[in-house]
Amino acid sequence: MIKLLSVGEVAAALQVKISTVYQYVNAGKLPCVKVGRRIRFKEEDIEAWIKSNSREVVA
């Protein structure tokens, strides 16, 4: 079964404000699914997005 995350859950996972998540969605930067009037995020899509947008820190 596909696990869908809310905007608040994604904001917590990314450690950003909820408004930032909405900005990413409106800019087309973050994959989402509309369920009725609500925005939801597939957990696997968010995990893939984090991996593709992360950089290694070289100390």
Image (cartoon, rainbow, N blue to C red):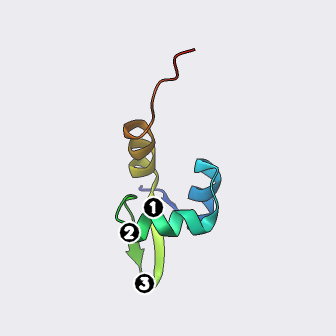
Asked if residue 56 can be seen in this view, the reply is: yes
Q: What residue did someone put label 1 on?
A: 41
Whichever of labels 3 and 1 marks the residue nearer the N terminus, that label is: 3
| Residue at the limit of the structure toward the top, as seen here | 59
Give the residue at mark 2: 33
Q: Position of residue 19 (x, y in %)?
A: 59, 69
Q: Is residue 18 left or right of residue 56?
A: right
Image quadrant where one finds the N terminus: bottom left
| Residue type, label 1 | Phe
Q: Is residue 6 visible?
A: no
- Regarding mark 2 in the picture, which secondary structure is present there? strand
Instruction: Give the alpha-carbon distance from disc 3 to disc 2, as whole Å.
Output: 9 Å
Checking the image for residue 36, the label placed there is 3
Residue at 37 percent of width and 58 percent of height: 29
Please identify the quadrant where the C terminus is shown.
Answer: top right
Residues under numbered marks 2 and 1 in contact, where contact means CB atoms less than 8 Å apart: yes
Picture residue at 39% right of the left edge, 64% below the top: 32
